[in-house]
Image (cartoon, rainbow, N blue to C red):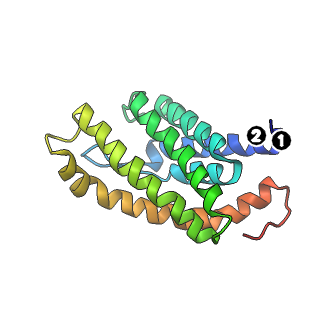
Amino acid sequence: MKKISTRQLTFAGMFTALATLLAIYPFTFYFPDYSRFTLREIPIYLCSFSLGPIWGGLCALVSDFLGTLISNSGNVFNPMFSLSALLSGVLPGLLFRFFIKSNKLNLAAAISIIPVNIAVSLFLTTLWFQIMGYTGGMPFWAYLLIRRLWLVAVMTVIQIFAVCALYPVVQRGIQGGKSNDV
């Protein structure tokens, strides 16, 4: 078993706190169709890329739970959305570990974020909305294409640029100031 350093634990806690902060009302824009624009996934992706998929999953799960508890938006804890959060923390880290070895940071981040956002944020979250009846009677594919596609596309582009800009800084911090060129 790999030893967990105090620095790694501290960074995981900071990523979780930042993701929780970005998940609450002042930093999230809600739309009438239950969709929301948030930057919450950026610290989760950074945690998953820099500390590994297990830490990324824990960060996403804890921030989802805490964000639900302290948010004043009327949201309640829902295990379906927590599963989506867990997957959005674990899957990018797995993909990133695989692709960073043979690609540059920008390409590895894009390859890691785009499929996860399509599978989890677009399809799985839309499915949860459909099951819970939040689609206003719209069929699954219509809701996905009309209401969710543009939002997920915009968030994906922002997430890729933010992660590519912040990842080298985070890596230096986790390694104690040592430079690690990617």
Secondary structure under badge 1? loop
On the rendered structure, is 122 left or right of 13?
left
Write the residue at 67% across / 47% down: 52
Using the image as rendered, state which of residue 173 and residue 79 is in the foreground.
79
Q: Which residue lies furthest to the left in this view?
A: 137
On the rendered structure, is 113 left or right of 182?
left
Q: Say which residue label 2 marks.
A: 9
Residue 106, given in percent of the width and then of the height, sits at 59, 70
Residue 14, given in percent of the width and then of the height, sits at 68, 44
On the rendered structure, is 162 left or right of 114?
right
Residue 31 vertical placement versus 77 (above, below): below
Q: Say which residue label 1 marks.
A: 5
Residue 31, given in percent of the width and then of the height, sits at 29, 49
Spatial CA span between label 1 and label 2:
6 Å
Residue 71 can be seen, yes or no: no
Locate residue 157: give its quadrant: bottom left
Write the residue at 63% across / 70% down: 103
* Quarter the N terminus occupies: top right
Residue 115 vertical placement versus 18 (above, below): below
Secondary structure under badge 2? helix
* Quarter the C terminus occupies: bottom right
Using the image as rendered, state which of residue 34 and residue 133 is in the foreground.
133
Write the residue at 39% across / 27% down: 76
Q: Which amino acid does label 2 sit on?
A: Leu
On the rendered structure, is 80 left or right of 135?
right
Confirm or deny contact between disc 1 and disc 2 (CB under 8 A).
yes
Write the residue at 37% across / 57% down: 152
Using the image as rendered, state which of residue 64 and residue 57 is in the foreground.
57
The circle drawn on residue 133 is: none
